[in-house]
Image (cartoon, rainbow, N blue to C red):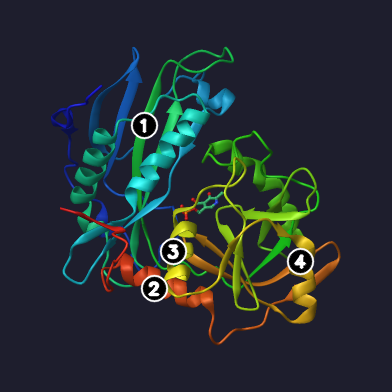
């Protein structure tokens, strides 16, 4: 079915709340812009997309999202260059991924025309919320929830697709030390690990709290069957540099197909860095650390682009990573950000201008 983007209804706020926001002191994900995008699914079809003032939504307590967690989301960012142009980074990947996540959760796919017309109209309305400068961005959160008023355990007949936006500053999380998981799992074969399903994140909170009590900030999840192979972190894919080779786990039905991950792999190839996409045994990483061959571990994801890992723990042992002068992670971060902020050539065609 073809959806008509002229249907988009825009209802603007009377007065922006931007003046009340301190852009020099933003806590990630706490402040939202003036407007939001909303589109409901009913009678077998997505209806009436609208942009309206940001605010609470009303749902029946029996709405299926509250009972069965039928919900998926995305995370992407808009950037502003020195000439006030607005850019997205590979947004079609996020669009494809939210529909892939939806399909896995039995949620009807969202039409591409509605997604891009809604997103671009919203970003144009919120252009003043996107601040110039390396590291500043507007975090964009598209999501879908099941809204049917009924507690029977089967797929909802009604949904709400929304996009909300939150201004973000460069994110510095301090030194990150991770724990390799020995007991808990994030995802299993045949499960929903590859989907950005809301419940995947809730399920990580308890084991992550335990890891925090043990002095780590995050967990690197291992495969659920054996816990012998390193897979990904809670919101990042993970790369290991052993010698001068970069190694990362293949995507699968347990691992999210990260946009930053695939961009790092392409950049590494451009730079003639050897990349191996294969299973990563915990034993290989520990042995490399003992021999001094493990030079870097870093995470990749939209929130931080590249997040260096300072050390890790496994069973009762702790390992520290060297501080590299010629860090691959730092070089990828710099290159990716220059592309995102329109400061470098974009030979892969990853930038998308919002006009
Ligand atoms: C589980 C998980 N892995 C990896 C990533 C990184 O993906 P991307 O680079 O597309 O942000 C994310 C964040 O979206 C995530 O939630």
Kindly tell me whether mark 2's CB lies below 8 Å from ligand 1.
no
What residue is drawn where x is 59% and y is 84%?
A: 324
- Which numbered disc covers residue 284? 4
Task: Return the disc, 4 or 2, that comes first in the chain's sequence.
Answer: 4
Front of the two marks 4 and 1 = 4
Which of the 4 image quarters holds residue 49? top left
Q: How far apart, in angstroms, are the residues tagged by discs 2 and 1?
A: 33 Å
Residue labelled with disc 2: 335
Residue 85 x, y percent position in the rendering: 18, 62
Task: Return the disc, 4 or 1, that comes first in the chain's sequence.
Answer: 1
Task: Return the disc, 2 or 1, that comes first in the chain's sequence.
Answer: 1
User: In the visual, does 260 lie left or right of 113?
Assistant: right
Mark 4 residue crowding within 10 angstroms, few (<14) / some (14–19) / many (20+): some
User: In the visual, does 59 lie left or right of 39?
Assistant: right
In the displayed image of the protein, which residue is found farthest to the bottom?
A: 325
Residue labelled with disc 1: 161
Instruction: Please report contact status of discs 2 and 1: CB closer than 8 Å, yes or no.
Output: no
Q: Is residue 62 visible?
A: yes
User: In the visual, does 213 lie left or right of 33?
Assistant: right
């Amino acid at each position: 079915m073809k959806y008509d983007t002229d249907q988009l209804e825009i209802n603007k706020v009377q007065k922006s709340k931007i003046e009340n926001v301190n852009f020099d002191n933003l806590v990630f994900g706490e402040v939202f812009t003036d407007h939001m995008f909303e589109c409901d699914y009913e009678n077998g079809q997505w209806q009436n997309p609208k942009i309206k003032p940001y605010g609470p939504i009303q749902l029946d307590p029996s709405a299926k999202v509250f009972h069965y967690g039928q919900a998926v989301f995305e995370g992407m960012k808009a950037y502003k260059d020195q000439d006030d142009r607005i850019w997205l980074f590979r947004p079609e990947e996020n669009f494809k991924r939210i529909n892939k996540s939806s399909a896995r959760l039995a949620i009807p796919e969202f039409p591409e025309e509605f997604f891009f017309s809604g997103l671009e109209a919203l970003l144009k309305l919120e252009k003043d919320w996107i601040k110039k400068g390396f590291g500043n961005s507007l975090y964009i959160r598209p999501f879908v929830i099941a809204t049917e008023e009924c507690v029977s355990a089967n797929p909802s007949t009604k949904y709400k697709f929304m996009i909300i936006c939150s201004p973000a500053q460069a994110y510095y999380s301090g030194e990150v030390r991770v724990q390799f998981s020995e007991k808990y799992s994030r995802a299993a074969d045949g499960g929903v690990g590859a989907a950005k399903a809301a419940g995947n994140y809730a399920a990580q909170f308890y084991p992550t709290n335990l890891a925090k009590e043990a002095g780590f900030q995050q967990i690197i999840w291992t495969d659920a069957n054996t816990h012998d192979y390193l897979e990904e972190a809670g919101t990042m894919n993970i790369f290991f540099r052993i010698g001068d080779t970069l190694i990362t786990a293949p995507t699968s039905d347990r691992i999210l197909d990260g946009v930053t991950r695939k961009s790092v792999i392409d950049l590494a190839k451009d730079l003639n860095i050897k990349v191996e996409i294969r299973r990563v045994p915990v034993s290989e990483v520990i042995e490399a650390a003992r021999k001094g061959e493990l030079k870097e571990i870093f995470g990749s994801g939209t929130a931080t682009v590249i997040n260096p890992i300072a050390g890790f723990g496994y069973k009762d042992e702790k390992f520290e990573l060297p501080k590299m002068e010629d860090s691959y992670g730092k070089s990828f971060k710099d290159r990716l950000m220059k592309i995102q902020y329109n400061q470098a050539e974009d030979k892969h065609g990853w930038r998308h201008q919002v006009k």
